[in-house]
Image (tube, grey):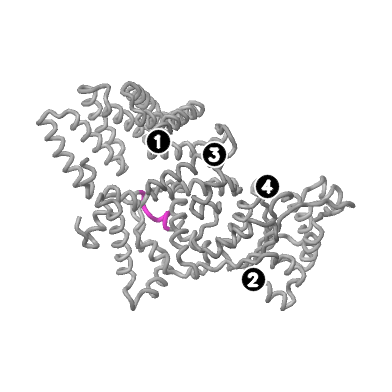
């Protein structure tokens, strides 16, 4: 294939033009049609979809002349359908998808048939035909599963999962969207397509963010035996780290119903850690309720916590369930517990001792079954010694103790979190871009006094500033980050040299992994072939 020899778009177009001239001169209609198809593929990758359609149309016209019922005709029909989906022209997309299905069925090509049904489903979605889209996705999955066409099956499952997230009424079983995404993720992982694994991670994290519920299982098709094969950050349903001590603490906490006290600086991810404990526990399908002590108004705090009955005070016109009863059966997360007033500390102590709730104005108590997880950015032991926090409450809360270290003490997580957040904000703002490997190196050099919260703000700023289709480079980092990174690296090799070294290592490893195939290496790095060629030139690699 010509595309395997491509270094950049200009070289590719030159080679394709040469291939077309030879094909026309020698009367090689099939090769001419394929060259037009590859040209269209290149333009689609560059986002020039209108021009790509013109090349696909020429390729299709040639294919229809020499072999109207052939593999090239089926492929180009399907690619035209996908291009029209990208251009938001669903009727044309449906027409070409159906043509691709017909040709693929006649030549008994199940892979192309399955891919064409996926294109049809996406076109039907644009037309608002959700039921038809669901049927087409099902046919695609069934067709590709039978022949174990892993790559196309993974693409279909990813598209199906995204469809079910947006249209949950089309689900046939609870958690079906996560099942589809989970299976797609495993297939991409086996194929070594890391950039697509990260895209699926984004979609899974979006489910958790938008619903506020971190589920432990990804659907009935996923067995408990399969879970250990999943990367740790996905098993933990939200808390992303490579720190083995924290992972071990998380699993131990999830295996019991003991109370947990989390301490750590602001922004270290204490709530996410608590949600992950809940997600991995036996209470995963029950409520996860958050009490933010720092934002709890003192005057109505008791009512917010324990509820009230009608007439308990002025304005109490009906019975009101408090946060504790809302968490019954599940997990009650008390954030910034060190901010509680002495009166509320006593109330909380009684709740922990008796596991009962008495709403304001009520005569009777109600039993509750809740798992308590508390978090603070203070040193509670020091607060106890200073007389600011009840000692008995401190020991009640400290059933299990976990300290979450700041990012500057777990720098290996900065790259992991940065990649996750780049994917997340790329999807949120519908922004496509490439990322210089040197950016991740620069981010890892900064101390992040605001921890994950500050890192997330920095990544969002990066994505907002990079132009559509552009490249995130170190010069787009905020002034504070750039100054600190430069200070950390000056006197040794300098930031510029370190960035160049990281790029050299990344490019070299990708080329080694794919046997010198620059197209595959560029895809694995999440950049275009043109960008790869530029980086190869900058690090003085020979092609």
Eye-nearest disc, 1 or 4:
1
Of callouts 1 and 4, the N-terminal one: 1
Of callouts 3 and 2, the N-terminal one: 3
Of callouts 3 and 1, the N-terminal one: 1
Q: CA distance from mark 3 to mark 4?
A: 21 Å
Is disc 2 surrounded by few (<14), some (14 to 19) or many (20+) residues within 10 Å? some
Labels 3 & 4 near each other (Cβ < 8 A): no
Q: CA distance from mark 4 to mark 2?
A: 29 Å
In the image, residue 348 sits, relative to residue 387, either above or below, namely above
Q: Residue at x 39, y 75 (%)?
A: 487
| Left or right position of 310 against 420 | right
Of callouts 1 and 2, the N-terminal one: 1
**Residue 171 appears at what percent x and percent y?**
56, 33
| Left or right position of 399 against 303 | left
Q: CA distance from mark 1 to mark 4?
A: 37 Å
The residue that mark 4 highlights is: 286
The residue that mark 2 highlights is: 378
The residue that mark 3 highlights is: 221
Q: Residue at x 47, y 51 (%)?
A: 424
Is disc 3 surrounded by few (<14), some (14 to 19) or many (20+) residues within 10 Å? some
Eye-nearest disc, 3 or 2:
3
Q: SS of the residue at dot 3? A: loop
């Amino acid at each position: 294939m010509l595309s395997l020899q491509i270094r950049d778009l200009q070289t590719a177009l030159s080679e394709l033009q040469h291939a077309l001239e030879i094909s026309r001169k020698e009367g090689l209609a099939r090769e001419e049609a394929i060259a037009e198809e590859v040209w269209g593929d290149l333009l689609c990758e560059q986002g020039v979809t209108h021009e790509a359609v013109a090349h696909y149309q020429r390729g299709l016209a040639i294919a229809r002349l020499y072999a109207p019922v052939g593999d090239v005709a089926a492929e180009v029909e399907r690619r035209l359908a996908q291009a029209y989906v990208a251009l938001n022209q669903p009727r044309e997309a449906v027409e070409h998808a159906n043509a691709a299905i017909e040709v693929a069925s006649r030549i008994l090509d199940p892979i192309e048939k399955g891919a064409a049904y996926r294109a049809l489903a996406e076109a039907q979605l644009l037309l608002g035909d959700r039921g038809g889209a669901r049927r087409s996705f099902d046919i695609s999955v069934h067709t590709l599963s039978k022949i174990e066409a892993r790559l196309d099956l993974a693409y279909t499952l990813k598209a199906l999962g995204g469809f079910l997230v947006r249209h949950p009424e089309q689900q046939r079983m609870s958690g079906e969207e996560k099942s589809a995404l989970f299976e797609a993720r495993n297939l991409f992982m086996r194929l070594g397509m890391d950039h697509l694994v990260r895209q699926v991670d984004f979609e899974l994290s979006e489910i958790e963010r938008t619903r506020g519920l971190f589920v432990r299982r990804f659907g009935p098709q996923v067995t408990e035996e399969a879970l250990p094969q999943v990367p740790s950050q996905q098993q933990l349903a939200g808390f992303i780290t490579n720190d083995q001590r924290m992972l071990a603490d998380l699993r131990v906490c999830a295996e019991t119903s003991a109370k947990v006290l989390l301490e750590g600086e602001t922004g270290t991810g204490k709530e996410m850690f608590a949600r992950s404990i809940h997600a991995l526990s036996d209470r995963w399908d029950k409520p996860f309720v958050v009490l933010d002590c720092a934002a709890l108004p003192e005057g109505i705090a008791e009512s917010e916590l324990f509820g009230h009955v009608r007439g308990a005070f002025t304005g109490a016109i009906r019975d009101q369930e408090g946060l504790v009863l809302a968490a019954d059966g599940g997990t009650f997360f008390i954030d910034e517990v060190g901010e509680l007033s002495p009166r509320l500390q006593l109330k909380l102590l009684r709740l922990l001792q008796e596991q009962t709730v008495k709403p304001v104005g009520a005569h009777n108590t109600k039993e509750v079954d809740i798992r308590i997880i508390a978090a603070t950015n203070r040193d509670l032991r020091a607060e106890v010694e200073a007389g600011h926090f009840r000692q008995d409450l401190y020991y009640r809360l400290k059933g299990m103790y976990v300290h979450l270290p700041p990012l500057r003490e777990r720098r290996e997580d900065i790259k992991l979190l940065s990649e996750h957040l780049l994917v997340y904000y790329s999807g949120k703002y519908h922004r496509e871009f490439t990322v210089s490997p040197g950016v991740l190196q620069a981010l890892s050099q900064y101390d992040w006094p605001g921890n994950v919260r500050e890192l997330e703000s920095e990544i969002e700023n990066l994505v907002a500033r990079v132009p559509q289709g552009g490249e995130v480079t170190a010069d787009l980092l905020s002034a504070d980050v750039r100054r600190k990174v430069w200070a950390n690296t000056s006197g040794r090799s300098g930031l510029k040299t370190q960035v160049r070294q990281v790029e050299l290592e990344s490019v070299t490893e990708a080329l080694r992994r794919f046997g010198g195939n620059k197209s595959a290496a560029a895809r694995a790095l999440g950049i275009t072939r043109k960008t790869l060629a530029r980086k190869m030139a900058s690090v003085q690699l020979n092609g």
